[in-house]
Amino acid sequence: MVRYILMMYITLVPAILAGIVVMIWCKLPVLKALSKPVDFGRNFADGKRIFGDNKTWKGILGYVLFNMIFSVLWGLVLGNGTLRDLDFFYQQHDNTFLYNLLTGFLLGLGYSLFELPNSFLKRRIDVTPGKTKKGFWKVFFVCLDQADSVFGVALVVWLFYPLGIGLYLLYVLVGSLTHLFLNMMLYFMRLRKNMF
């Protein structure tokens, strides 16, 4: 169990680093044209926004771009040594530049796309973007906010290594707790508006 958790962290170093850098990236005054919402400001059939203003093309580009960069760099750091053997991505595949670009691209896509259903659900029940409700809904969305992107990145890992449902769910649990910790850290660093 401890070995698997260690492997999870080693495998997701690029996604963790990319998630932190994207917070900074989205605040930088570059590529402002891409700061447009993914839903183009359109409403769903119920008259409410599809995803809201916080899900932007710049954010998706950032997740994909920085996951690719960090996956390539992490592949160079790991090389062919002992740590490489603890990365799920290299259990059945070689550590190559193109392979790392592919896994980075998919990690970024999985991370960003799996956040969208959560935003869609929040708009349906009138949760203001970047905010949360009180009571049950607050607890539900705090948990979902930590887990949504982890479902995506763990699924990408599963594409390249046969995790099985038990290990996949462990990945989601450990990843969600890590995501919660990182959000708290980013909040105290003033890179996030809300802790949860």
Image (cartoon, grey):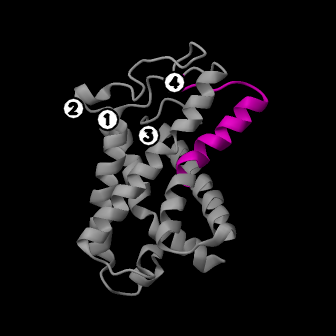
* Tag 1 secondary structure: helix
Labels 2 & 1 near each other (Cβ < 8 A): yes
| Main SS of residues in magenta | helix
Q: Which comes sooner in the sequence, label 3 or label 1?
A: 1
Q: For the residues carrying marks 3 and 1, which lies nearer the camera in this image? A: 1
Earlier sequence position, callout 2 versus callout 1? 2
Q: Amino acid at mark 1?
A: Lys
Work out which residue is located at the far left of the displayed protein and give it: 30
Rendered location of residue 33, percent (x, y): 23, 26
Mark nearer the N terminus (4 vs 2): 2
Q: Is 185 displayed left or right of 134 in the figure?
A: left
Q: Which residues are magenta?
A: 129-150
Q: Which residue is mark 2?
A: 31
Tell me the tag on residue 38.
none
Q: Earlier in the sequence, mark 4 or mark 1?
A: 4
Pick the residue in front: 193 or 61.
61
Name which residue type carries label 3. Answer: Met
Determine which residue is flagged by label 4: 50
Distance (Cα) linking label 3 and label 2: 24 Å
Q: CA distance from mark 4 to mark 2?
A: 23 Å
Query: Sequence-wise, which precedes: disc 4 or disc 3?
Result: 4
Q: Which residue, given by chain and number where applicable, does mark 1 sit on?
A: 58
- Of residues 183 and 35, the one nearer the viewer is 35
